[in-house]
Image (cartoon, rainbow, N blue to C red):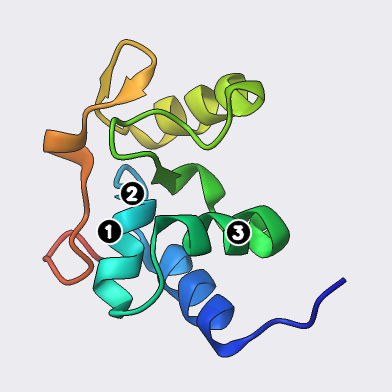
Amino acid sequence: MDSMNPFAEKVLDLVERIPPGKVMAYGDIAEYLGEGGPRQVGAVMSTWGGGVPWWRVVHADGSGAAPDHLRRCLAHWREEGTPLRGERVDMRLARWDGRSADFQ
């Protein structure tokens, strides 16, 4: 397994700070960090994301990380009270900007 690089550490640190009931899209994370892009964030999450609240990182359309994880995502989202639209996160209500008062 590859050793973790500084970008991966930044991604995982940010994901750990996303409050329950909130999400960030892969691109949101890259934009917040000012480096990488959605694919690079996705690569970090697929390699090292199992130890952080991975269900709080979604596609820009509010869909979960991968179709095979949908049930687990839905269970976490419902438990945390994440606003949903069907089986997707309601990005208008649930998107976290990384600096708002939503962080506790």
Q: Which quadrant is home to the C terminus?
A: bottom left
Q: Which residue extends farthest bottom?
A: 6
Instruction: Report the residue at 24% width, 65% height from top.
Output: 103
| 10 Å crowding of disc 2: few (<14), some (14-19), many (20+) | many
Image-based side of 35 in relation to 11, left or right:
left
Q: Are marks 1 and 2 in contact (CB under 8 Å)?
A: yes
Say the numbered circle drawn on residue 64.
Answer: none
Taking the spot 18% from the left edge, 61% from the top edge, the residue there is 97
Position of 27 relative to 67 (above/below): below
Where's residue 101, x and y in %? 12, 65
| Residue occupying image coordinates x 22% and y 55% | 96
Q: Is residue 78 left or right of residue 53?
A: left
- The three-letter amino acid code for the residue at tag 1 is Asp
Q: Choose top left, top right, bottom left or bottom right for residue 80.
A: top left
Q: Disc 1 versus disc 2: distance between alpha carbons?
A: 5 Å
Callouts 3 and 2 close, C-beta under 8 Å:
no
Q: Earlier in the sequence, mark 3 or mark 2?
A: 2
Q: Amino acid at mark 2?
A: Ala
Q: Name the element at disc 1.
A: helix
Q: Which residue is mark 2?
A: 25
Nearest the viewer among 88 and 26 is 26
Residue depicted at 64% across the width and 86% down the height? 5
Residue type at numbered disc 3: Ala
Whether 23 is drawn above or below 18: the answer is above
Q: Who comes first in sequence, dot 3 or dot 1?
A: 1
Q: Check disc 3: other Cα within 10 Å, few if <14, some if 14-19, many if 20+.
A: few
Instruction: Quickly name the residue at label 3.
Output: 43
| Front residue of 16 and 8 | 8
